[in-house]
Amino acid sequence: MPTPPRSFSVSSAGLFRQCPRRWHFRYVEKRPDPPGEPALLGTFVHRVLELLCSEPAGGRTTDRARELAAAAWPETRDDTDFIALDLDDYAQRQFRWRGWTAIEKLWELEDPAQVDVEATEAKVSATVGGVPFFGIIDRLDSARDGLVVTDYKTGKAPRPGDVPDKLDQVLLYAAAVEDQRGERPSRGRLYFLGNQVVETPVTEEGLNGSVSRFSETWTEVGRSCADDEFDAKVGPLCGWCPYVADCVEGASEVRSRAGRGRLKSDAPARVLLGL
């Protein structure tokens, strides 16, 4: 019988809600889940912004960011997951250009030289809603109204109806910071680089909602582990599941979508299932 993990993260909770079967493959069987190009691009951008915001405030310029991007590039270029993408020279240049474009967009959202950065890539271990929580906060800022939790996103900004779900992440980080430090952040914000800033005040109501959903998911994980049952939730994302070849329901869903012309041409499941 599987045992629940010793700690629970925002990403782990999100994956379980997306598909308990995929969560089981990833967190119980410990199968690798190689990041795709978008995820690796996000890692590169986050690394450069981490380095930039660790600089003295006056040194956070676009010229310095360009130097840091060049210095950080070998970390990505030599990463085994990046090598596995098998990108040719042109595709690598395009990758770097997309990364730099996202980095440069930060100056359209704020002047980083004017931000009082308290910490970058801040690890936080806490108890949130009775759940052992672990997370890494991209940036923790000090502002006139208190601490601000900031998280970078390289993807598109969410549709209005999806905003509350996206804000769960920074609200859970805020709850963890409060548990760990005894100080409640005043705001949480998501920087969708190149798109917009999505921000929320940290209120009792907002925290209670996010923490409640997180705690409920943890309870569901415990129940699934106790019963050793992890049902598959099929849908469009099956086309991007790295374990689809070992999931009867997922493979059937992908084949059905392919047969109806509803499977995107770049879905990795096409290769995994030989479609």
Image (cartoon, rainbow, N blue to C red):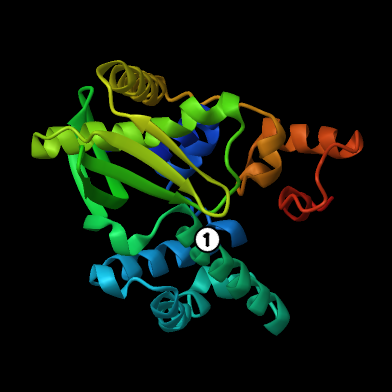
Compared to 187, does 229 lie above or below?
A: above
In the image: residue 147, left or right of residue 24 = left
Residue 82 visible in the picture: yes
Q: Quadrant of residue 224?
A: top left
Residue lying at 24% horizontally and 33% vertically, measured from the top left = 186
Q: Residues within 10 Å of mark 1 (few under 14, many from 20)?
A: some
- Amino acid carrying mark 1 in the image: Lys
Across and down, in percent, residue 266 comes to 77, 53
Quarter containing the N terminus: top left
What residue is shown with label 1?
Answer: 105
Across and down, in percent, residue 271 comes to 76, 56
Across and down, in percent, residue 270 comes to 78, 51
Across and down, in percent, residue 210 comes to 35, 23
Q: Point out the residue furthest to the left here.
A: 182
In the image: residue 265, left or right of residue 155 = right
Residue lying at 73% horizontally and 48% vertically, measured from the top left = 269
Secondary-structure class at tag 1: loop
Tag count: 1
Residue lying at 29% horizontally and 43% vertically, measured from the top left = 149
In the image: residue 157, left or right of residue 176 = right
Q: Point out the residue furthest to the right here.
A: 260
Q: Quadrant of residue 113?
A: bottom left
Residue 19 visible in the picture: no
79 vs 160, nearest the viewer: 160
Compared to 271, does 124 lie above or below?
A: above
Residue lying at 25% horizontally and 35% vertically, measured from the top left = 174
